[in-house]
Image (spheres, grey):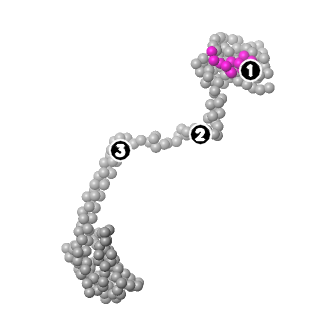
Amino acid sequence: MATVQGLCRNCGSLMMIDDRDETCECVFCNCVFPTSEAIEIFNDPEGREFPNEKFEPSAEGKRHHTTRVFSDDNIEKAIKREELAKAQRGDDVAVKKNEFEVSPNDVKAPAKAVLIISSVFVALVVITIVIALPMYNTRKDITAKISSNIESVFDGVAEVDTRVGDDGYAAGYSICGQTCQTVKVITDEDIGEDGARTMFENYCSVRSEARGKSGNAGVNLTIYSGDVIYSVTEKNGSINVKCE
């Protein structure tokens, strides 16, 4: 015994029938006909025509389930219905897309909003350039003026390699900071605290001349002298030297 699929010869409905029964009855149109014919139509529906006549329920009251009524134009779809359903439920096929999942393509900003955001971004870039460029040029100008007189900072204190390489950086010292307030110096000589203090005073003098204004607040001079590191700063007019 087996429950098999068949097609009604009258209306084309898909039927689930018992192959042990000699006859089957369509629950849609009440057509009673041989079970073997329903199976045969299901296996080879091409060229079949369905008259869609009206029938009264049979006296035996047979009940055979049908899943859907198909027209002549989509009989082939009816045959493959179960295969498609299995494919949708199967583990070896792609999972159906979540209807409530939001993808980037579903979220699109209005053209006006995009234009406003772009304009604001461009404006911020322009403002940044307008502010930063003069500051950069000022620092570059001060650095150049200090570098041109850097020998006077070390004169009589220590031997420092002031040669500038192809990369634009000096071998024995570096100057950084927006106001050239941070300086690092390398020398093989042990200059002592007095030498470190003198070098600090010399640098502050050259820096003030390059900037066109006095004031040593914030200046930090680090000297790598032999095995000793000197950190020199000024606070309230007093020069402080720390050794490490």
Indicate whether 6 appears above or below 211: above
Amino acid type of disc 1? Arg
Amino acid type of disc 3? Val
Q: CA distance from mark 2 to mark 3?
A: 34 Å
Sequence-wise first label, 2 or 3: 2
Residue picked out by circle 1: 63
Residue 93 place in picture, x, y as percent: 61, 38
Q: Residue at x 61, y 24 (%)?
A: 77
Indicate the secondary structure of the residue bearing disc 2.
Answer: loop
Viewer-nearest of labels 1 and 3? Answer: 3
Dominant SS type (magenta):
helix
Residue picked out by circle 2: 95
Q: Is residue 218 magenta?
A: no
Indicate which disc residue 123 carries.
none
Viewer-nearest of labels 2 and 3? Answer: 2
Q: Which residues are magenta?
A: 35-47
Indicate which disc residue 114 carries.
3
Indicate whether 54 appears above or below 207: above
Q: Residue at x 65, y 18 (%)?
A: 45
Q: Point out the image quarter for the C terminus.
A: bottom left
Residue 171 place in picture, x, y as percent: 33, 75
Indicate the secondary structure of the residue bearing disc 1.
Answer: loop
Q: CA distance from mark 1 to mark 2?
A: 36 Å
